[in-house]
Amino acid sequence: MKLLLPFLSFATILLISACGKEEYDVRKASEQYCRDNMVFSCEDDPDAEIYFRGKLNGKEFCISIPQGNYFAHSAVATTASTAVDEEYNANTPLRGSFYRMAIRPPIFDNLNGITRDFEPVFTLDSPMINDSVVYAPEYYLDQYFQEGELPIRKEGEEATEGFRFFITWSTVLRPGYEHYKRKNPAMIPVVGMSISPTFGPASHAKLELTEMQKRATPEGFRYYFTFKMDAELFYLCQYFAGDRFGTLEDGEFRMIIDI
């Protein structure tokens, strides 16, 4: 597995630097568009082994693999003393590491830029280890992922304090999409946002690992995880950060990891 320098969330990916009030207002309009036009839906696959499903504000939402060409992502992720959007190099000192598992849409592999709006992503992160050492994946999975209720990181708490989970989506930057599409399709800016209990008080949030199995395979080990969760969710973005989105009820995340 590759070690990854993570982004804080998909909501902060591909920010294009600009100056002046006009460009700043473009971002606000794009965030508003992103917030107003997201529709969560569910085409449930009862045979899926890797999935996320739940009710967002009372409406069914689900994503699963391989439906819609979604794929599983799991890896040790690192944070460095540089900003998350700066290029990492071997001389950059590590600040910490954690384990990330996610269900992602195929737009992450689109070499021509992200050109489809509103493809949701589900991500779950372990607590961070404040250490310059990057450990083997098995260490994080055995150390942190034990059956029972898991602590959820609250707003303002250190990254070592608990788990966090979030749902993210994005929109191609509006207005200005046509300009970037003509100029350089591979560099189309993206504005996105996330919802999570971590971005608010998290006073009404619960995360439980109801199943954890570790089985030996010819190649190493296979882990089976089932998480259940209920929470109030809050936005993370530039202009609406901390605003209440609503509720997640009967959330369930099923993941299989081979190491």
Image (tube, rainbow, N blue to C red):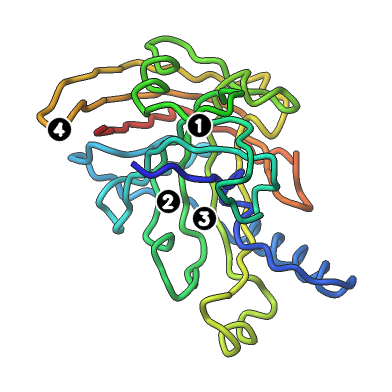
Q: Please give the label number shown on residue 41.
A: 2
Residue at (49%, 20%) from the top-left corner?
207
Which one is in front in this view, the residue at disc 4 or the one at disc 1?
4
Which one is in front in this view, the residue at disc 1 or the one at disc 2?
1
Q: Say few, some or many: other residues with alpha carbon within 10 Å of mark 4 (under 14 / 14 to 19 / 20 or more).
A: few
Percent across and percent down for residue 85 are 65, 54
Asked whether the residues under the numbered discs 2 and 3 touch, taking CB atoms below 8 Å apart as contact, a structural biologist would say yes
| Mark pair 4, 1: CA separation | 25 Å
Q: First in sequence: mark 1 or mark 2?
A: 2
- Is the N terminus in the top left, top right, bottom left or bottom right quadrant? top left
Q: Which residue is mark 3?
A: 39
Q: In the figure, is residue 237 to the left or right of 189?
A: right
In what element is the residue under mark 2? loop
In what element is the residue under mark 3? loop
- Is the C terminus in the top left, top right, bottom left or bottom right quadrant? top left
**Three-letter amino acid code of the residue under disc 3:** Val
Q: Which residue is mark 1?
A: 125
| Mark pair 4, 3: CA separation | 40 Å
**Three-letter amino acid code of the residue under disc 2:** Ser
**Three-letter amino acid code of the residue under disc 1:** Asp
In what element is the residue under mark 1? strand
Q: First in sequence: mark 4 or mark 3?
A: 3
Q: Which residue is mark 4?
A: 219
**Three-letter amino acid code of the residue under disc 4:** Glu
| Mark pair 2, 3: CA separation | 6 Å
